[in-house]
Image: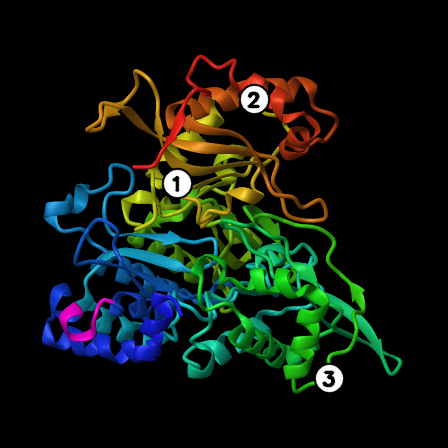
Amino acid sequence: MNTVERWKQEKHPLDVVEDVREYAAEGLAFDEIEERAGSGEWERLKWAGMYTHGRQSGYFMLRTKVPGGYLTPEQAEVIGRVATEYATAPEEHGGAEQNELWGDAFLDITTRQDVQMHWIRLEDVPEIWDRYDEVGLTTVQGCGDGARNVLGCPAAGLDDHEAFDAQPVVEAVSDFFTGNREYANLPRKFKLTITGCREDCAQSQINDVGLTPAAKEIDGERYYGFHARVGGGLSDGPRMASDLDVFVRPEDAVEFCRAVAQVFKELGDRHNRGVCRMRYLVEQLGPERFEAAVRDRCTVDLRERGTDLTEGYTGDHVGVHDQKHGGLRYVGFNVVAGRMGGEEFVEAARAARRYGTEETSIRLATDQNFLVTHVPEGEVEDLLAEPFAADYRPDPGPFSRGAVGCTGSEFCNYGVIETKKRVKRWARALDDRVETPDDLDVVRMHLSGCSASCAQPQIADVGFRGETVKVEGEGSTNAEGDAIVEGVDFGLGGSLGLDNDFVDWVETAVPAGSVIPALEQLFAVYVEERADGERFYEWCRRVENDRLRTVMRRADATVAGGVAHDG
């Protein structure tokens, strides 16, 4: 077994939840925790939803799970208040001035409909958990080798694009796995998504398990349920999920997901963590043998596939939209790179209560944005006049609308470059400087600070993964005298949906300062050559990569010539 597996054998990782309360009560420092529990404790703390900060010893990132992205206003307000009171940087790390764009006490909405906070002190975690308990929130298994937050359509129950509302199934599956000791020690993280939406905004194609809407005639009656995909994922070795020949009734969804987890638990690789994800197991067995293994372990009858009801892919819900309930609207607010102030999130929750009906909610989306639901038509204008809405307007430019960024080197152990500030600045600059066709409402531009793909760059119109770049005559120098700058690998042409495909990494080791000039050149040619209604990713696929590179290199910037620097 690899080192992490040995640590999990030494102590069940869920036991760390109670240990956190003990460490906090005793006021233990990091070195005292490691002396008592060993170095494996930092890995086990992920099961409590806690990651140690990459470069700021003594602090944690805390991840809150939000199944399907659904929050009541009360839950959203508690999250915002926790961020305001506890996610604060110490003076030695900049205090209220730690970040020139967001200041202090902010939170991040993630591509998995979670909420992340930084600068959390261990001694504050029990108090945060107590507040969460009062409103039904948890951080348990927000990280670690088990079922992560279960994704769903953020407009579940609202939109006529759905065949049925799958949010109750999302919550049932989440409840089954959260805190379940039998399935809390899998070979690697286990990502599920469940939706009744015809437009698959819950991204079934890139998850370990994806349940999508289907219908089947059984004994002369038409039933709604799910079709299943397995083995999708990004990072190194990206793979689109494979369809299984099964029809899963909603009441059987928990058991089906359990059976898949059982297969992964028994047959998944526990030796090489580089190939421990479930997609490698599906690839090795093949979808048919994997399905047979699931059927062998499933205690309910799994019928063959019925009629697939997925019609495409919708990447976001930004804007003002009609609900299927007469006279109501939901409003999708655009949060560039997913980061906003805790107090602003509190204000959004208050606004939802003020302008919405008793059923109003805050929904988090996989594109790092959020929705306010159940707003009467006559109240929408006042909601949009609220101060928090000025920065998160529902009518952004196309680059701001599609901008996604991971945590990056600011806080992440794996991040190679800074991402959040860079994404926000790039998006706003590109909206100002690039002329796009009137019918092009969004350009999906995703920046991951490393190859781990938390920002999902492989499925974007324009995807970036961070690296350091050696460029002659530019930037600061290292001890060897090389000029080193932050840079990216530059990918084009990714998307999900009926024409799904991953980006081609068209150019590597591009200095970050050359990205905007390169995109200006690409979009100038795209606008000139575009066929009617052609999306940017479609044009990128139609044009040869050599020509795309040639266009990018017309920029008055060092697009080519950089060399990846491993340092």
Q: Closest to the observer: 173 or 276?
A: 276
**Amino acid type at image mark 1:** Asp
**Residue 103 percent location from the top left of the image:** 24, 43
The magenta stretch is 34-39
Q: Is residue 239 left or right of residue 134?
A: right
- Indicate the quadrant where residue 125 lies: bottom left
What is the C-alpha distance between the residues marked 1 and 3?
Answer: 50 Å
| Vertical arrangement, residue 127 with respect to residue 113, above or below | below
Which of discs 3 and 2 lies nearer the camera? The answer is: 2
What is the C-alpha distance between the residues marked 3 and 2?
Answer: 52 Å
Q: Residue 105, can we see it? A: yes
| Vertical arrangement, residue 413 with respect to residue 155, above or below | above
Residue tagged by mark 3? 301
> Of callouts 1 and 3, which one flags the residue occurring earlier in the amino acid sequence?
3
What kind of element bears circle 1? loop
Which of discs 2 and 1 lies nearer the camera? The answer is: 2
Q: Is residue 420 left or right of residue 479?
A: right
- Indicate the quadrant where residue 87 lies: bottom left
Q: Is residue 547 left or right of residue 476?
A: right
What secondary structure is the magenta-colored segment mainly? helix
